[in-house]
Amino acid sequence: MKTKLQYISQGSSLPEQESNILRALQAGVDWVQVRWKQAPEQDLLQLCLNVKRYCVVYNAVCIINDHVLLAKEISADGVHLGLEDGAVADARRLLGPGKIIGGTANTLQDVQQRIAEQCDYIGLGPFALTTTKDKLSPVLGLDGYRDVCRYFSERQEIIPPVYAIGGIGLEDIPALMQTGIYGIAVSGLITRCPELVSHIKTILQ
């Protein structure tokens, strides 16, 4: 896992989603997770096909949220699974070797589950209140990330890259990175201000 910055797409229509993703890629994002809940099936397919082509042009990773069969159909780089989106092992069998499978976690127990499932990376959150998810788990805050990272550090356990997610602002990034996480996944911040991508990457390094 090279990139420390993941962009999770945002938008309520195909043109809006596509525009937001393209602007993020043009600004330097090199990892896109296509996330569009309640999307019409055909529109979602068209979006994913378009984004896959854009990601090839911009040398970026293309991850599909939830939809394993769709990820296989368009030959995406991988899939991101929520805690209720099906088994990692099933996705691994379907997608085959070499594909990236990430998983959501909200608690230390979830992280342990994701490690046991052999996820390639973990999206741990939410860091703060966010409007991009309907059903929000308890907010972790900085202390939540410190506690999780400390738990594995004290046991000298090697874990997959952990990305903080959920309501992250520019001012939160330095303190978040000091907790021991690997990187961040953001949606609204880059959707609103794609010109911040290079600055965010500098902070993350």
Image: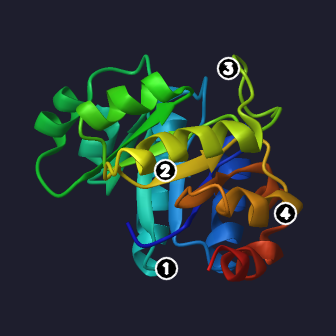
Residue at image x 52%, y 61%?
182
In primary-sequence order, the first of circles 3 and 2 is 3
Amino acid type at mark 1: Tyr
Lower sequence index among marks 3 and 4: 3
Count of residue discs:
4
**Mark 3 and mark 4: span between their CA atoms?**
22 Å
Disc number placed over residue 170 in the picture, else none: 4
Return the residue at label 1. Answer: 58
Of the residues tagged 1 and 2, which is closer to the observer? 2
Left or right for 156, reference 51: left
Residue on which disc 3 sits? 137
Q: Cα distance, mark 1 to mark 2?
A: 24 Å
**Marks 2 and 4, Cα distance to the nearest angstrom?**
18 Å
Mark 1 or mark 4, which is nearer to you?
Answer: 4
- Residue 38: image x %, image y %? 61, 23
Label 4: how many residues lie within 10 Å, few (<14), some (14-19) or many (20+)?
Answer: few
Q: Amino acid at mark 2?
A: Val
Q: Quadrant of the C terminus?
A: bottom right
Disc 1 residue crowd, few under 14, some 14–19, many 20+, Cα 10 Å: some
The disc labelled 4 sits on which kind of residue?
Leu
Disc 3 to disc 2, C-alpha distance: 17 Å
